[in-house]
Image (cartoon, rainbow, N blue to C red):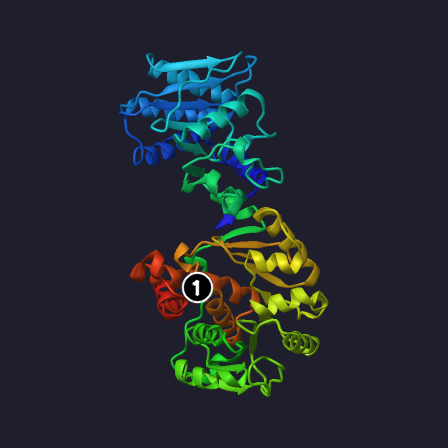
Amino acid sequence: MKIFTNENIQLIDRITIEKEGVSALDLVERVADGVMSELVLRWRTTRTTLVFAGPGNNGADALAVSRRLYEQGFRPEVFLFNIGGNRLSSECRRSRDIMLASCPDIAFHEISTNLIFPEITSSTQVLDGLFGSGLRDSISGGFRELVRMINDSGAYVVSIDMPSGLFADWNPNLVARDVIHARLTVCVQLPRVAYFLADNAPLVGEWKCINIGLSSTAIQATSTPYHLVESSEVRRLLRVRPEFCSKADFGSACLVAGRYGMIGAAVLACRGAMRSGVGKVTLHSPQCAFEVIQSAVPEVLFSPDKDRLMLSEVALDHDYKAIAVGPGIGTHDTTIKALDTFLKSASQPLVLDADALNCIALSPSMLNHLPVLSVLTPHAGEFDRLFGEQHSAETRLLKALEVSRYYNILILLKGRYTSLVRPDGKVYFNSSGTPAMATAGSGDVLTGLIAGLMAQGYKPEVAALIGAYIHGRAGELAAEEHGEYGVTAGDIAFNIGKAIKQIMNQ
């Protein structure tokens, strides 16, 4: 699914109106229908309901919803802010007039001078139609006071399109207190970039998209660097295995992982790789890992390091189709030197995770030797150690775009919406996953899974994209069985094959 900027959405709106015979007021009514379909599932007619409408089309949407609330037995009190008078958009004015004509006894206040602040409590239901995605500047003055009052009340807030005060794309100077904290944001047609950043999660709350029939031709023709990865896209990318095949047809992967006390990380990475469908997996690890691997993952071949306890060299004696380095290797000086030597001679894209990233952070010159289109899979802490401390998820993503382009690498920034950042500036947000996956070793499984996919001939950018989605779906399946508290990384690995089967059969 495409994720459009605010400018893109405005263009698609305009094309829909100009080319398809749909009026702006028609779109307002469609938004209102969609919002109302969500409200009736959540709100009670017996509770106090307040509607705050701004002077633009977001306010028009809110007024049209107010009419539907009234018709459904709610008794909303509606506040339309027209500060200074004559500030209403034509759609907002028409929506107001239609509401007043069809609901003559509705509690309605049009405010043109001083702001009115009604009583708001934790049991109040609030519809936020103040600014939405039409905001141009940060909220200030009386509106800021109103926003803070709503937030402090603990009311059940539903925002239309965007929580008022939050910009749809980037929010470099975000002051969370000055943004509506919605429990639900009803997204109009297509999601916005701001929805996918952890900083904004307490503001956006749950988000649900409603289809208002924007031009499919315009949506298809409008390009964007931002995408949400869904099951249908992954299904198109996954290959069906031919009936006549052998393990030689599905590549060989080498995982460089483990040290004394951290062999479990190597085991989990191997299990992730094996469940990917790869033909063969070899683990290069200190000698102390031999018995563990042979008993825990007997399908995996073993390549012993010359050192018994730690990784001291990456001397691989086979032409592997994919190589992943990092899970549990530690950051001993000997290991850092071994990784540095290996990177200087490496020519194919690698998967680098966990301690490989920590080693590079301790010796940043290694970044200059990363093979083109290598996949780095950091969580926030690992990313900041590599590329500098970031004060927000937004700045971290923007920094990832910068360094991805500079080093010509792929960065899979792990989180709720794991983000694949490409050197061409494209960002793919992963839609699968569950909080149950916040468990030790989950990332090791992902490393093995991506390496296994690359070994089968998937390009690094494709392997990272589908690997993240499959990993998330496997976590969802594990959570269905064990609950969000009970999932282990081993459960995620165990469910990879089931996840792939489910995706391909949908």
Q: Which residue is mark 1?
A: 471
Picture residue at 52% right of the left edge, 28% below the top:
131
Position of residue 244 measured from the top left corner of the image (x, y, whole percent): 40, 83
Q: Is residue 238 left or right of residue 346?
A: left
Residue sitting nearer the eye, 450 or 506: 450
Position of residue 376 relative to residue 121, above or below, is below
Q: Name above or below for residue 116 compared with residue 357.
A: above
| Left or right for 489, reference 451 | left
Does the image show residue 223? Answer: no
Task: Identify the residue at horizontal 46%, vertical 81% (top origin).
Answer: 279
Quarter of the rendering containing residue 39: top left
- Image side of residue 76 versus residue 15, left or right: left
**SS under mark 1:** helix
Residue drawn at point x = 61 percent, y = 51 percent: 396
Query: Can residue 370 be seen in the rendering of this structure?
Result: yes
* Residue 10 place in picture, x, y as percent: 55, 35
Residue in the foreground of this view, choosing between 357 and 26: 357
Residue 152 quadrant: top left
Q: Position of residue 141 (x, y in %)?
A: 58, 21
Q: Is residue 278 above or below residue 190?
A: below
- Residue 219, position in %: x, y? 51, 45
Q: Quadrant of residue 501?
A: bottom left
Q: For the image shown, how many numbered marks are present on the structure?
A: 1
Report the amino acid beneath label 1: His
From what the image shows, is residue 406 above or below residue 15? Answer: below
Dot 1, how many residues are within 10 Å of its Cα: few (below 14), some (14-19), or many (20+)?
A: many
The quarter of the picture where the C terminus appears is bottom left
